[in-house]
Amino acid sequence: MYRIKNVLAGLVVLCWSATLTAMPVHPAEQVVRDTTTQVFNALDDEALGIRKDLSKLYALVNDTVLTHFDFQRMSRRVLGKHWRKANSDQRSRFAQEFQTLLVRTYATALLEYSDQKIAYLPVRKGSRASEAVIRTEVRPPGGMPIPIGYAMYDGGKDWKVYDVSIDGVSLVINYRASFNSQIRREGLDGLINKLAERNKAQGK
């Protein structure tokens, strides 16, 4: 898949470098900053234990970062027409396995983190006042900046992520292409079963 781990690694480092600014921070950006700070504080406190027991790392990711993702909306967008045709059980199973897949991938990215600088770019407003794209650049030492954007919407109580893009490529669209190919070969149940097998293997 197209640099999926880099996409998720970008989430890891968003608040690693705190850039002070006199301008008020957009509430969606504040969610990203606060959440990532929470992750790194926990990692600093429990680094040794987390490396010895990945289940702790998975729990940390699931309880902090990924609570700000709308997996139902992401699942609908990823499956597209297949979501509309799916029954309630298939939708529930897919959303759960898709969430677990992102937790496992993101947790792996955490362990591979290396020092990178983050620049926050001006927030891009969506077509509605309740939507925004948080734009950042991940700047690795000696490397080219990697633009990463987080499409978010105001869920009422909190801003939620419903897509992530890197170098202009959408995470949802990238997964959609891969999943569509598998669905054509094995059907939706086949895809869900493959995701479940992969998640189980990574959870060992």
Image (spheres, rainbow, N blue to C red):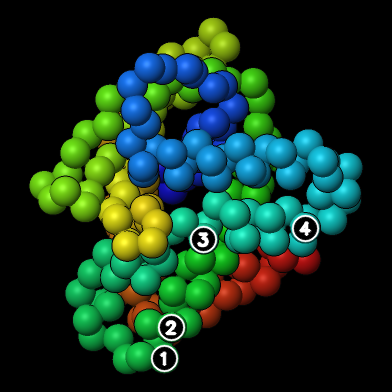
Question: Which residue position holds label 1?
Answer: 89
The answer for how far apart the CA atoms under marks 3 and 1 are is: 22 Å
- Badge 1 amino acid: Asp
The answer to whether residue 188 is above or below residue 118 is below
Which residue type carries mark 4? Lys
How many discs appear? 4
- Any mark on residue 56, and which? 4
Residue under pointer 3: 67
Residue closest to the eye, 151 or 178? 151
Against 197, residue 66 (above or below) is above
Disc 2 target residue: 92
Of the numbered discs 3 and 1, the one sitting upstream in the chain is: 3
Q: Nearer the viewer, mark 3 or mark 4?
A: 3
Distance from the alpha carbon under mark 4 to that under mark 1: 29 Å
Circle 3 packing at 10 Å, graded few (<14), some (14-19), many (20+), is some
SS at badge 2: helix
Q: Secondary structure at mark 3?
A: helix
Of circles 3 and 2, which is in front? 3
Q: Earlier in the sequence, mark 3 or mark 4?
A: 4
Residue 85: quadrant of the picture? bottom left
